[in-house]
């Protein structure tokens, strides 16, 4: 118990406890209405000093497709601008073969999220990751134990969330933690599927930690459970959620736009591919005084160097920023070999360049690592030999751009 108490103190010290107020709509089936999960969640929230306005639309055995086809589901979604709309499928459907999930489960699950966003773009579709049955499901070898079924449910709900750009309440992960670490706590009713009071309380704690992003430990409401059992369930929920906020895409409302992109480089040309979530507007800064508002595009750099490429992805709820550092190499500019060009250090930041078989022109430019053109002091000793002075610049990497016999070249100088 000392170890558990220390762990809870460490978790609690990492989070603030300002009062928050949210609205949550639960859309699901008997896993929602058995033991009245929304009310348990609301009471738990109130006991922690926060406020949750809740409602539910729970129909026994309903799949995502059933919910999508039911006008009552959409009436509930459009009743108000919810902060979270919890979406739960039939208890087995996400664990079925991937091809079946792709054709029958994923499309309606995503379509329900689209309905949530259409009502209020700042709402978050939160998928209710349910749990494996007590002894698994015997109809298929891949789910015939709790661990197998629970693992497939976990992976499916994460994949559904990724496709719908939603978030996940990882109840199934907390469920496994309790089974592995507190095996005397029975989370199931006699049917080995539906939750006991302990199971519903664990789900409520997981929804609290997921929606508020802070610990459920310390809640005085225990749904009639003894304090020791309640504390163990709170701990399991907190560990499942708070150590993995990014895995479950749990973010405050002001940050539901997620800036994300990757780049494809070709010499001085940079293609940016936008992978952002839930954003409607984009602001690019390529680090060379060039900006853009396109979704995807290509930018050409005038000079080689190291640049900070920044994307601000935003929507009506807020914004997020991502910066990627890119190294742009010269394209179309050759570098003379050591046999063709000798670079000699003269000391104190001065260098001598000797071109053995080619003649320098009078146009020699200096470019910094950030791509900016810099003033360069050059002394032409003769057509094959020049001296440059970098003594006024700090140590670092620089590029010389010059021509020899009408051919453009680039030479890296490390001061």
Image: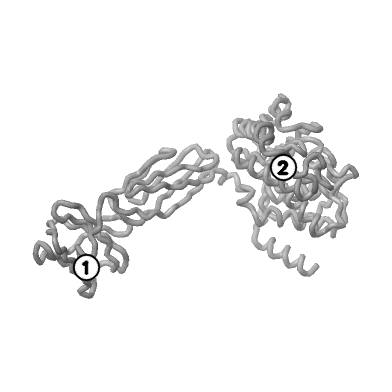
Front residue of 97/403: it is 97
Residue 352 figure quarter: bottom left
- Label whose residue precedes the other's in the sequence (2 or 1): 2
The residue indicated by pointer 2 is 128
Residue 2 image point, x, y percent: 78, 69
Q: State the CA–CA distance, disc 2 to disc 1.
A: 65 Å
Residue 42 in view: no
Verify CB contact (< 8 Å) between mark 2 and mark 1. Answer: no
Front disc: 2 or 1: 1
Q: Position of 257 compared to 188: left or right?
A: left
- In this picture, is 266 found above or below 398? above
Front residue of 321/336: it is 336
Q: Residue at x 70, y 25 (%)?
A: 69
Are there few (<14), some (14-19), or many (20+) residues within 10 Å of tag 1? some
Q: Which residue is drawn at 74% across and 32% down?
A: 63
Q: In which quarter of the image is the C terminus?
A: bottom left
Q: Which residue is drawn at 24% across and 62% down?
A: 337
Q: Position of 377 compared to 88: left or right?
A: left
**Residue 343: assigned label:** 1
């Amino acid at each position: 118990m000392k170890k558990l108490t220390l762990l809870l103190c460490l978790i609690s010290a990492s989070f603030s406890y300002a009062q928050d107020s949210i609205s949550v709509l639960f859309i699901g089936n008997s896993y929602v209405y058995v033991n009245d999960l929304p009310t348990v969640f609301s009471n738990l929230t109130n006991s922690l000093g926060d406020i949750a306005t809740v409602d539910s639309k729970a129909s026994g055995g309903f799949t995502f497709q059933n919910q999508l086809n039911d006008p009552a589901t959409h009436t509930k979604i459009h009743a108000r601008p919810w902060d979270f709309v919890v979406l739960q499928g039939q208890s087995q459907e996400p664990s079925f073969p991937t091809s079946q999930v792709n054709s029958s489960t994923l499309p309606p699950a995503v379509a329900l999220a689209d309905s949530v966003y259409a009502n209020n773009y700042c709402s978050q579709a939160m998928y209710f990751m349910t749990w494996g049955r007590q002894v698994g499901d015997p109809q298929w070898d891949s789910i015939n134990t709790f661990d197998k079924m629970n693992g497939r449910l976990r992976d499916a709900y994460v994949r559904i969330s990724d496709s719908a750009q939603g978030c996940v309440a990882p109840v199934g992960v907390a469920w496994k933690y309790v089974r592995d670490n507190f095996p005397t706590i029975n989370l199931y009713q006699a049917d080995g599927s539906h939750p006991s009071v302990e199971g519903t309380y664990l789900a409520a704690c997981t929804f609290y930690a997921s929606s508020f992003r802070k610990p459920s430990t310390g809640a005085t409401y225990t749904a009639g459970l003894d304090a020791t059992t309640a504390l163990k369930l709170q701990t399991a929920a907190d560990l499942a959620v708070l150590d993995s906020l990014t895995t479950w895409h749990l973010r405050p409302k002001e940050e539901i736009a997620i800036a994300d992109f990757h780049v494809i480089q070709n010499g001085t040309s940079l293609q940016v591919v936008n992978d952002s979530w839930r954003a409607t507007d984009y602001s690019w800064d390529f680090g060379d005084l060039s900006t853009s508002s396109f979704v995807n595009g290509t930018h050409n750099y005038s000079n080689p160097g190291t640049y900070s490429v920044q994307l601000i992805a935003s929507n009506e709820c807020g914004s997020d920023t991502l910066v990627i550092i890119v190294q742009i190499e010269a394209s179309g500019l050759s570098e003379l070999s050591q046999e063709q060009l000798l670079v000699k250090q003269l000391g104190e930041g001065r260098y001598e360049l000797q071109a053995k078989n080619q003649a320098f022109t009078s146009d020699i430019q200096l470019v910094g690592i950030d791509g900016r053109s810099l003033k360069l002091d050059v002394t032409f000793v003769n057509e094959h030999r020049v001296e440059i002075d970098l003594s006024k610049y700090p140590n670092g990497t620089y590029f010389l751009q010059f021509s020899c016999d009408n051919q453009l070249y680039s030479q890296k100088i490390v001061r």
